[in-house]
């Protein structure tokens, strides 16, 4: 299969490209604009005969048309992905997440190409800490931030293009990913690299907020299964039963790096901060037979810490500018 991967120079997209090229015979073309979040260094060492990189914008209809004419399937990761940035300046989120997805869908419609849309559990809003229910494919949409509302909008566009125009699309909504190649603006890499630099981790608000962590490699294996066996027009939730509150995660990072567990700072909370996400991935597991490989968060976190320790050259160029932005926001 000739696969086009949008956003393949970002965190989850690059993990997916490595996964596909090592686990299958497919060839991969990455289409990526290389925004501040894209990094070509995340795509080093891939087999040259099965991998191509194209720098470009998913809103560029002419480029997208040409690429769709010579691929069998598209996996759409490209997005503006960071909630804090969406609170500061929502516009790029509308351009890429809404108009970009629309541009890809129009090309998928014209070329009849298989389309998989990558989305997030944040489209469902948040849960109370003691709510026994978790998100399922039937939970109503209720996004909180400019980021999650544009992702919700993009999901609805995909559904409309399936129903109105017969586009052969599937959607997956995944929980919070961790692993190598994640930008230092995000929670886990920010705290790891702070400690590695001799700075203190920064916890928003009380730190009671819960995220449902999954290793990026498990996200990749789930997407491959959906591409191979998923039913057109359907949505699958991806999660690995990894609920943890932020305070516990910060304490684990500090402990694993040999620091006192309380050596962190509380900083300004995120406006509109979602309290808890939790995914019920029964459908994916029972209908498509998927299971995560990383079932031990502490071991996965330790491996991720080792990756950041060994790859300072990868993250150091972004660290100072990222922290300067946070400092200006009191975070
Ligand atoms: P990221 O910010 O690390 O990477 C996004 C990539 O998209 C970057 O390489 C960037 O250069 C590229 N890009 C941005 N705008 C573009 C445009 N207009 N044209 C072409 N390329 C463009 O994001 P991520 O964390 O890897 O997330 C990838 C996808 O997975 C997103 O759709 C996100 O909503 C979804 N998702 C993320 C998580 C998570 O925990 N990070 C969880 C569930 C779903
Ligand atoms: O310094 C920090 N301190 C802190 O306490 C940062 C950066 C974050 N946080 C908190 C906010 C969240 O409760 O940690 C949690 C995780 O924050 P992020 O890494 O910004 O992720 P989140 O907002 O949960 O969204 C992520 O998961 C869903 C991705 O960025 C999204 O792209 C994805 O859709």
Image (spheres, grey):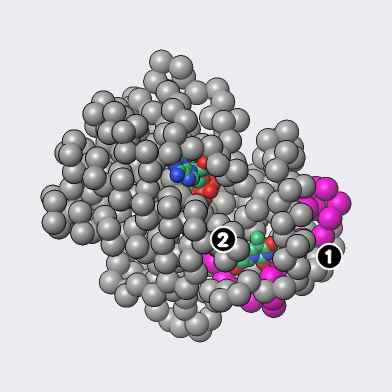
Query: Horizontal placement of 246 versus 80: left or right?
Result: right
Q: Which mark is drawn over residue 89?
A: 2
What's the residue at 28%, 71% (across, down)? 138
* Magenta residue check for 206: yes
- The residue positioned 33% from the left and 27% from the top of the image is 26
Picture coordinates of residue 250, whole percent (x, y): 71, 63
Disc 1: which residue? 263
The CB of the residue at mark 1 lies under 8 Å from ligand 2: no
Dot 1 alpha-carbon crowd within 10 angstroms: few under 14, some 14 to 19, many 20 or more: some
Q: Is residue 224 above or below residue 146?
A: above
Q: Residue at x 53, y 74 (%)?
A: 274
- Specify whether 188 is left or right of 5: right
Residue 67 at x, y percent in the picture:
31, 30
- Could you say which is closer to the camera, residue 218 or residue 167? 167
Secondary structure of the residue carrying tag 2 is loop
Asked if marks 1 and 2 touch (Cβ < 8 Å), the reply is no
Judge from the rendering whether residue 270 lies leftward or rightward of residue 100; answer left or right.
Answer: right
Q: Residue at x 48, y 66 (%)?
A: 146
For the N terminus, the quadrant is: top left
> How far apart, in angstroms, are the residues tagged by discs 1 and 2?
32 Å
Is 78 or 294 nearer to us in this picture? 78
Give the secondary structure at mark 1. loop
93 is higher (above) or lower (below) than 205: above
Q: Quadrant of residue 108?
A: top left
Q: Is residue 316 left or right of residue 18?
A: right
The stretch in magenta equals: 192-217
Q: Is residue 247 above or below residue 91?
A: below
Could one spot residue 52 in this view of the protein?
A: yes
């Amino acid at each position: 299969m000739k696969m086009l991967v949008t956003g393949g120079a970002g965190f989850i997209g690059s993990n997916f490209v490595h996964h596909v090229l090592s686990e299958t015979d497919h060839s991969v073309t990455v289409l990526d604009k290389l925004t501040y979040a894209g990094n070509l260094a995340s795509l080093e060492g891939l087999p040259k005969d099965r991998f191509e990189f194209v720098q470009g914008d998913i809103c560029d209809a002419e480029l997208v048309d040409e690429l769709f004419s010579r691929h069998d399937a598209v996996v759409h990761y490209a997005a503006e992905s960071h909630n804090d940035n969406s609170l500061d300046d929502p516009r790029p989120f509308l351009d890429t997440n809404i108009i970009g997805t629309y541009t890809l869908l129009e090309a998928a419609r014209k070329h009849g190409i298989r389309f998989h849309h990558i989305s997030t559990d944040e489209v469902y809003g948040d849960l109370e800490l003691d709510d026994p229910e978790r998100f399922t494919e039937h939970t109503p949409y209720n996004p909180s931030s400019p980021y999650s509302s544009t992702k919700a909008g993009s999901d609805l566009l995909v559904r409309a293009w399936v129903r109105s125009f017969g586009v052969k699309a599937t959607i997956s909504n995944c929980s919070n990913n961790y692993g190598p190649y994640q930008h230092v603006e995000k929670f886990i890499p920010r705290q790891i690299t702070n400690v590695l630099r001799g700075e203190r981790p920064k916890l928003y608000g009380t730190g009671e907020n819960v995220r449902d962590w999954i290793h990026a490699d498990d996200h990749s294996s789930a997407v491959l299964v959906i591409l191979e066996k998923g039913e057109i027009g359907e949505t699958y939730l991806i999660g690995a039963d990894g609920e943890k509150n932020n305070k516990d995660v910060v304490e684990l990072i500090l402990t694993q790096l040999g620091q006192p567990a309380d050596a962190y700072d509380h900083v300004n909370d995120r406006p509109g901060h979602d309290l808890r996400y939790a995914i019920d991935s029964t459908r994916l597991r029972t209908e498509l037979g998927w299971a995560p490989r990383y079932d031990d968060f502490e071991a996965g976190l330790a491996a991720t810490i080792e990756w950041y320790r060994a790859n300072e050259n990868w993250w150091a160029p972004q660290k100072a500018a990222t922290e300067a932005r946070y400092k200006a926001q009191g975070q």
